[in-house]
Image (cartoon, rainbow, N blue to C red):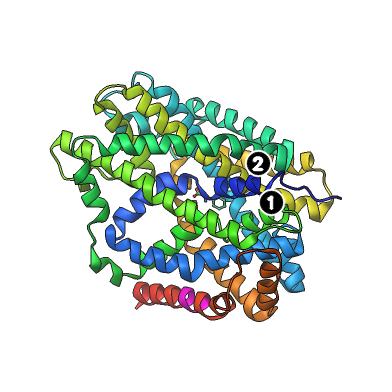
């Protein structure tokens, strides 16, 4: 079977950016920052970025490009006994996909509700009771919630369609169309946010450092978790995407571009989001801390309140915000599906269409779970599990496999330098062998110690 390829170098970079920039940037990051020391969080964030995020991003690029395959294939090339790690990471991506699509379904509904701010004054009760139907007494599986099922089904249909079309005509095409519009919308939202009354209050909340947070292991775990999630590393996504690159491709340069643009997008978008939070707090005469909510609450409860109070053109502001979530999230959803699709294609010799149908069909069924009334309950469990066991542990295993078990890290460095114009230096193998595993392991042990001793 001839391997699929991206159309152009920029096509790949946009697809990789599309994967990286997602709900993690717009929904997860702002509340993770606030809850983990605000301005001080930037310290563990950068530490995580340089000791693990970027080095592992390069590792994934080089693995996919050198061995030209999806996760399981690549890992078994490194060592026969390690194929399972590729399956594990692809399965984690598949599970994330099932709830990611549901959140995108909510964003689609909320795009519609933005017209005329249909959620009314009590946005919390609207979200939980009217929309999700988490009313008391229905139990965990209280029945299907049609208002959620319909938008989720529409998005699944779109996802099937894009993935059927393949890497170049589907994924690359969607990213080329959505990412530039997304960036433009976020720039507008941020500029408008900064000019709102009370924006400064929000920025203070974003940047004022709480240094005491740095002594808590969970703050560090959260920083690593956020960095992995936002860069899409540790899920075989970047392995798979890099495997569709032509033989001569500038891996190092692309890696830097993707990491830099993702993280600056995240940082910048949060300026807009916190300005808007400062505005809401000012309108309500409270502290910013009182309006900040957890990840999902921030987008679907607090943001609607901001839109209610918005001075002029509020429907437009709402539509822009929720369409941003949709565009950012859709190109990430595609990249959560692709590792599994490529893996089962290679393993079972399936056509792309068949692989898409199996993988997305199963994930769509799984996503029904969260569409039941009260399904939010599952979402929390899954999210906790993935953050604590899925990401960090699998990152440790990856670097141990590359640096110690197979000892391939030096030849991977040569591979990158052979094909790239920008060279990566001797720092990289050292980081992969020592710094990444040691810092991740130290953090996990510190956390266990704090929790159990
Ligand atoms: N990086 C995406 C985000 O920030 C999520 C993602 C994780 C996508 C892993 C693919 C693989 O939302």
The span picked out in magenta is: 437-441
Determine the CA span between mark 2 and mark 1.
18 Å
Element marked by disc 1: helix
Residue in view at x 55 percent, y 48 percent: 17
Element marked by disc 2: helix
Determine which quarter of the picture holds residue 406. Answer: bottom right
Residue 417 image position (x, y, % from top left)? 67, 69
* Numbered badge on residue 213: none
Point out the residue furthest to the top here.
Answer: 116
What secondary structure do most residues of the magenta stretch adopt?
helix
Pick whichever, 265 or 134, lies toward us.
265
- Is residue 135 shown left or right of residue 11? left
Q: Is residue 440 magenta?
A: yes
Q: Which residue is labeled 2 in the image?
A: 172
Residue in view at x 62 percent, y 36 percent: 174
Pick whichever, 378 or 59, lies toward us.
59
The C terminus: image quadrant: bottom left
Residue 132, visible in the rendered structure? no
Residue 443 image position (x, y, % from top left)? 42, 74
Residue in view at x 40 percent, y 23 percent: 113
């Amino acid at each position: 079977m001839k391997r699929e390829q991206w159309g152009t170098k920029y096509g790949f970079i946009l697809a990789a950016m599309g994967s990286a920039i997602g709900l993690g940037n717009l929904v997860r990051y702002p509340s993770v920052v606030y809850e983990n020391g605000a301005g001080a969080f930037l310290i563990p964030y950068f530490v995580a970025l340089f000791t693990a995020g970027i080095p592992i991003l390069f590792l994934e690029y080089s693995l996919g490009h050198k061995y030209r395959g999806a996760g399981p294939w690549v890992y078994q090339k490194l060592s026969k006994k390690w194929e399972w790690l590729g399956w594990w990471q692809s399965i984690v991506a598949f599970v994330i996909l099932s709830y990611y699509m549901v959140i995108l379904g909510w964003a689609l509904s909320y795009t519609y509700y933005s017209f005329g701010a249909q959620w009314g004054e009590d946005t919390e009760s609207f979200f939980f009771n009217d929309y999700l139907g988490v009313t008391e007494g229905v139990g965990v599986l209280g029945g299907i919630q049609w208002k959620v099922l319909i938008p989720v089904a529409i998005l699944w249909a779109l996802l099937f369609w894009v993935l059927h079309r393949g890497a170049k005509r589907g994924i690359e095409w969607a990213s080329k169309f959505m990412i530039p519009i997304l960036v433009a919308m976020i720039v507008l939202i941020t500029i408008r946010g900064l000019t709102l009354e009370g924006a400064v209050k929000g920025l203070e909340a974003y940047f004022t450092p709480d240094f005491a947070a740095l002594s808590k292991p969970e703050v560090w775990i959260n920083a690593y978790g956020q960095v992995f999630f936002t860069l899409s590393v540790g899920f075989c996504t970047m392995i798979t995407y890099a495997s569709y690159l032509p033989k001569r491709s500038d891996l190092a340069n692309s890696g830097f571009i993707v990491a830099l643009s993702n993280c600056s997008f995240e940082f910048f978008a949060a300026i807009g989001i916190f300005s808007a939070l400062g505005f809401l707090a000012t309108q309500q005469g409270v502290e910013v801390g009182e309006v900040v909510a957890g990840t999902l609450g921030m987008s679907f409860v607090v943001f609607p309140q901001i839109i209610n109070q918005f001075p002029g053109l509020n429907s437009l502001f709402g539509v822009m915000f929720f369409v941003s979530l949709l565009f950012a999230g859709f190109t990430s959803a595609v990249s959560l599906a692709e590792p599994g699709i490529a893996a089962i294609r290679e393993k079972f010799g399936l056509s792309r269409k068949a692989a898409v149908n199996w993988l997305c069909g199963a994930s769509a069924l799984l996503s029904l779970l969260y569409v039941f009334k009260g399904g939010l309950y599952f979402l929390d469990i899954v999210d906790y599990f993935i953050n604590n066991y899925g990401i960090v542990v699998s990152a440790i295993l990856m670097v141990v496999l590359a640096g110690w078990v197979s000892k391939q890290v030096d030849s991977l460095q040569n591979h990158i330098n052979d094909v790239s114009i920008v060279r990566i230096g001797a720092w990289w193998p050292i980081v992969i062998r020592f710094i990444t595993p040691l810092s991740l392991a130290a953090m996990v042990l510190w956390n266990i110690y704090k929790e159990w001793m």
